[in-house]
Image (cartoon, rainbow, N blue to C red):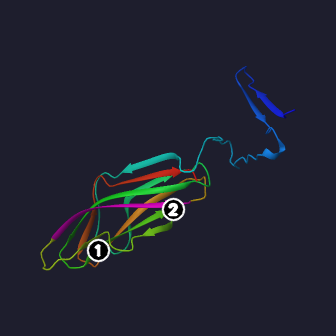
Amino acid sequence: MTAKIKLNAASGGGSFSLQAPSSSANNRVITLPDIADGTLLTNQTAGTVLQVKNMIIAGEFSTTSATYADNGLTLAITPSATTSKILVLINYLGAMNSNANGQQVKLKIFRDSTALFTSPSPYMRIRANNSSDVLLYAGQFLSYLDSPSTTSSVTYKSQSAMTGGGGTHYLTNGSNMTLLEVAA
């Protein structure tokens, strides 16, 4: 005889059944997540995209400072499970104006106040051989896979800095950030 638990809907709808495996050699364990009023997904597999958030900046960010500053790319997401990964995708559309050799733009990615990634080399660099202004347009795509280990809202943001002095970095309209929650 196979053990079975059956729950019928109170309003006369469908039913839900739990049934034990057919033999003792086929023991199975189902662990429920420790979340309040959550929904149990039974067909969730690793690598499945659970949600997508996207933002595009309107307007323009500019800086002449070597100190990192928020550049307008900021987006929040609330993971549905503590095991979820967040794939951060950032498409920077920028420009740099300089009249000096060796100007560089550097970038950082944060989760809340935690720095996750700092560009190891400049995302843009100018090598000018004279004192006239040089204007460089460039695009850069960065990705970072994060494990926030929470079901609370987290905010991802980007910061920019201009190093070397004497130049201006612009982040232009259309730069965007996308966050993908991925089942682990």
165 relative to 21 in the view: left or right: left
State the residue position of label 1.
104
Q: Position of residue 32 (x, y in %)?
A: 72, 46
Tell me, yes or no, whether the highlighted magenta stretch contains residue 88.
Answer: no
22 to 171, vertically: above or below:
above
Q: Position of residue 1 (x, y in %)?
A: 87, 32
Using the image as rendered, state which of residue 27 and residue 134 is in the foreground: 27
**Considering only order in the chain, which callout, 2 or 1, is on the residue closer to the N terminus?**
1
85 to 99, vertically: above or below:
above
Quarter assignment of residue 44: top right
Tell me, yes or no, whether the highlighted magenta stretch contains residue 136.
Answer: yes
Most extreme residue toward the right is 1
At label 1, which amino acid type do we have?
Gln
Quarter assignment of residue 108: bottom left
The residue segment tinted magenta is 134-147
Residue at 50%, 62% (x, y): give it.
111
Q: Which mark is residue 112?
A: 2
Q: Which mark is residue 85?
A: none
